[in-house]
Structures are given as C-alpha cells and as structure tokens.
Image: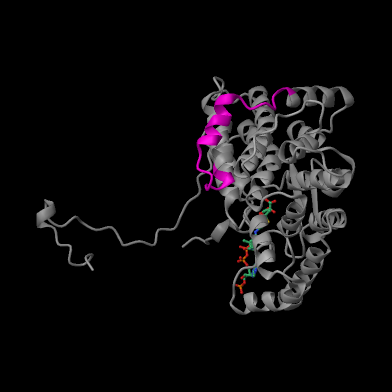
Amino acid sequence: MSEIKKGLAGVVVDTTAISKVVPETNSLTYRGYAVQDLAASCTFEEVAYLLWYGELPDPGQLQLLTQRERAQRRADRSLLSLVEKLPENCHPMDVVRTAISYLGAEDPQEDDSAQSANLAKALRMTAVLPTVIAADMRRRRGLDPIAPQSDLGFAENFLNMCFGEIPDARIVEAFQSSLILYAEHSFNASTFTARVVTSTLSDMYSAVTAAIGALKGPLHGGANEAVMHDMLEIGEPTEAAEWMRRKLAAKDKVMGFGHRVYKNGDSRVPTMRAAFADVAAVAGGEKWIEMYDILESTMVEATGIKPNLDFPTGPTYYLMGFDIEMFTPIFVMSRITGWTAHIIEQAGSNALIRPLSEYTGVPQREIQGSSLLERDFSATVS
Ligand SMILES: CC(=O)SCCNC(=O)CCNC(=O)[C@H](O)C(C)(C)COP(=O)(O)OP(=O)(O)OC[C@H]1O[C@@H](n2cnc3c(N)ncnc32)[C@H](O)[C@@H]1OP(=O)(O)O
Ligand SMILES: O=C([O-])CC(=O)C(=O)O
C-alpha cells in the first residue's frame, strides 16, 4: 500500500513563482517582496499588478491598469437584476459565485485562455466584483446600490459603495492592508481548486467560480465570519477565557486559530493585528481588542496554537461596519488577484492534475443472477 498523505499535507505538487510561504521564519513574500512591506507601502492596485505581471508597476503601467480597472467597475443592469433575483437569505458567497459564473456566460471570449485574454478577464472580474458585493450588502439592508466612482481608488471606492461615504483615512488604510494581506497565499485550498479546474483546460471564470466554493468553507475563508459570530456569542472580555476553555475541553475547533502550513504563527497576523488596533481606536472597539488578546493568550497557553489571518480580520471588518456575512466575499474581492495569477501560471505550464487513490471498498465480485428479480440482495438490505 502506498503512503497516503491525507489532505495532501506536506506534499509539494508543483512549482510557483507567485508567492513563498516560509513557516520556519513566519514569512510570506509576493514575487519576492515581504507582504508586510507591501501592506505598508503599496496600494491594492499595485499589488494586483505585481501578482499578475511579476513586477511592481512603474507610474505609466499603474496609470494604465488603474484607468482600465476604473472603466470596468460598473455592473450592467442584467447582472444587478440577477443579484436582486437571488433570495435575500442566501449567503452572499452564493451571490458572488453566481455573479462570476454569469460574467463567464456572457463573455464571448470565455474559452480564450491565451495569457493576454486571461489578464483581461482577471482585471474585469476584479473591477466589477466589488460593485456586486456592495450592491448585495445594501439590498440586504433595504438600500439602493451606489454607483462606482472613477475618481476613487479601489479600497475607497468599495467603502463608498457600501456606506455612501469615505470613512476616516485610518479605516481606509486598514481596509487596504487587509486586502493586500488576503491577496495571495500559495497553494491554499481555493487556489489549488482553481488550478485543478484550469488543468483540464477549462476557462478562467469556471476556475474562479470553483475557487469561491472552496473559500466559502469555515476551515478556509469562511473562518473570518465564524470568528465574529464567536466573539458576539462570548459578549464580554471577562467571559472569553472561560469560553475558550470550554471549547477546548469539548475538543471543538476554534475558528481563526491554527494553520496547515504555519505552525508557529501566521506571517500576516502582526500587520492585521496592528490594523485592527487602529480601527478599534477610531471606532471605539477596545472591548474587542481586549477579548481578542484574552482568547489568543488562553489558546496559546493551553495548546500552543496561534491565530491565523482570519482572527484579527473578523473583528476589524465588524468594526468597519460590514455585515458579518460580507466578510468572506470581501476576501474573494482580494484573493481573486492571487487566484487569477495562479490560473495564468497553471495554463502557461500545464499538466492535468489527477492524483491516485488507494481503493478500500469491497473486492471485485460477480453480479448474481441475470435480472433484477433473480438477484440476491440479502447481504445489502438492512
Ligand atoms: C485564510 C485561511 O484559510 S486560514 C485558516 C482558517 N481556518 C480556521 O481558522 C479554522 C480553524 N482551524 C483549523 O480547523 C485547522 O487549524 C486548519 C484546518 C486550518 C489546519 O488544520 P490541519 O493542518 O489539518 O491540522 P489539524 O486540523 O489536523 O489539527 C492538528 C491538531 O491541532 C488541533 N487544532 C488545529 N487547529 C485548531 C483549532 N482552530 N482549534 C482547536 N484545535 C485545533 C486539532 O484538533 C488537532 O489536534 P489533535 O492532533 O489532538 O487531533
Ligand atoms: O494557506 C492556507 O492554507 C490558508 C490561508 O492562510 C490562505 O489561503 O490565506
């Protein structure tokens, strides 16, 4: 029997030049740049360019990308009415998944997987998705959508479309940092899903649609929502340590902690924890900071398991005023840049992804009798 690597844990399946996760040093680089430096010095648009083209843009390249992104922000009437038709109680990730699928269906170049065509699709999806997400959040609040503005940067424009105003600059900066931190993380489950779909020579929209499905789960992107639900359930910082001990005693998974690759802390958490503190200072969220710190120290003392990026992001988005079910769609808005970079990389050096399995079912057997009536089902009927 061959050795089974359940969950592909520890298996290196391909090379990538997009990002590097080094668990030993808790570091993460995008195309060679440390993620915390990118979060401190760059806009989300610059990071998207870096992921897609391999280098940070010069002023002319950035201007071109920005112009194209801003020109494609508007969601056409048919897309917005599709969103309106979806049940208001469906999860917003269902809306995002449906929207990308729709964009594929209406694109006459859907099956053109040339690098230039894929780069154009990546930009189109990145540009229009925030408009869909903001419109969906507002309709759930009974509000009309706000049109995108072409004189605003990516982060500011999204916040304006959600809330009808541009918040304090510290909030915008923290939000932009979160987008940069969420943009890319090597062969995580959703990116790998996108690569598997691409490996069959399917199109970019199909790969992104599948990746959205993978990100939705609470063991992956859905954890940022679960974290905030837990924090609201806890209610007060004084209850946090006891809540955590109860969870651990019951052997429950605590969302926002642990990671498949990092075993000694997530490289992105210090930057996001600092952004959380900035937002809490502006929004009066000291209670959540206090609860965060108690949950972290109780978990680390009891198990040594450290928070992942979803732990600080959950309460930060809550304090920014987003509805909890919008947290994972915001993750999509950012990660779509990483997914599409990987789709382009996979398409450029493709091999069908098709692993093997070890069969553990019943041994080969004969069908008894020549018709349904003659067969003996006594062994299978309960
Ligand atoms: C952006 C992102 O996607 S980051 C990840 C977001 N996901 C979460 O926050 C969900 C909570 N975390 C988890 O479920 C896990 O840590 C994962 C899925 C992220 C990684 O898990 P794996 O590498 O498969 O490790 P696994 O789940 O086997 O955990 C190893 C041990 O640590 C424990 N453990 C790991 N994470 C947690 C946690 N969050 N809470 C409690 N115990 C945990 C497991 O129970 C297991 O203990 P055992 O050996 O006694 O059975
Ligand atoms: O790498 C992973 O397994 C999950 C993760 O942190 C991410 O996708 O950002």
Q: Is residue 172 left or right of residue 227?
A: right
Give the magenta part as a residue range: 71-94
Name of the residue lying farthest toward the top? 108
Q: In the rendered image, which quarter contains the C terminus?
A: bottom left
321 relative to 166, above or below? below
Report the number of discs.
Answer: 0
Quadrant of the rendered image containing residue 274:
bottom right
- Colour style of the rendered protein structure: one colour
Let me know if residue 89 is in the magenta part. Answer: yes
Q: Quick one: which residue is furthest to the front in this view? A: 142
Residue at the (77%, 50%) spot, across then down: 320
* Residue 362 among magenta residues: no
Give the camera-side residue of 106 and 78: 78
Taking 270 as reference, is 42 above or below it?
A: above
Q: Position of residue 136 (x, y in %)?
A: 61, 39
Rendered location of residue 317, percent (x, y) = 74, 52
Tell me if 112 is positioned left or right of 286 in this view: left
Image location (x, y in percent) of residue 147: 70, 29
Residue 198 visible, this angle: no
Q: Position of residue 318 (x, y in %)?
A: 73, 54
Depth check, front residue: 192 or 140: 140
* Front residue of this view, candidates 150 and 110: 150
Residue 318 seen in this snapshot: yes
Q: Please, is residue 145 above or below residue 64 in the view?
A: below
Query: Residue at image x 62%, y 80%?
Result: 249
Residue sitting nearer the eye, 310 or 350: 310
Q: Quadrant of residue 27?
A: bottom right
Quarter where residue 30 is shown: top right
In this rendering, position of residue 381 left or right of residue 355 = left
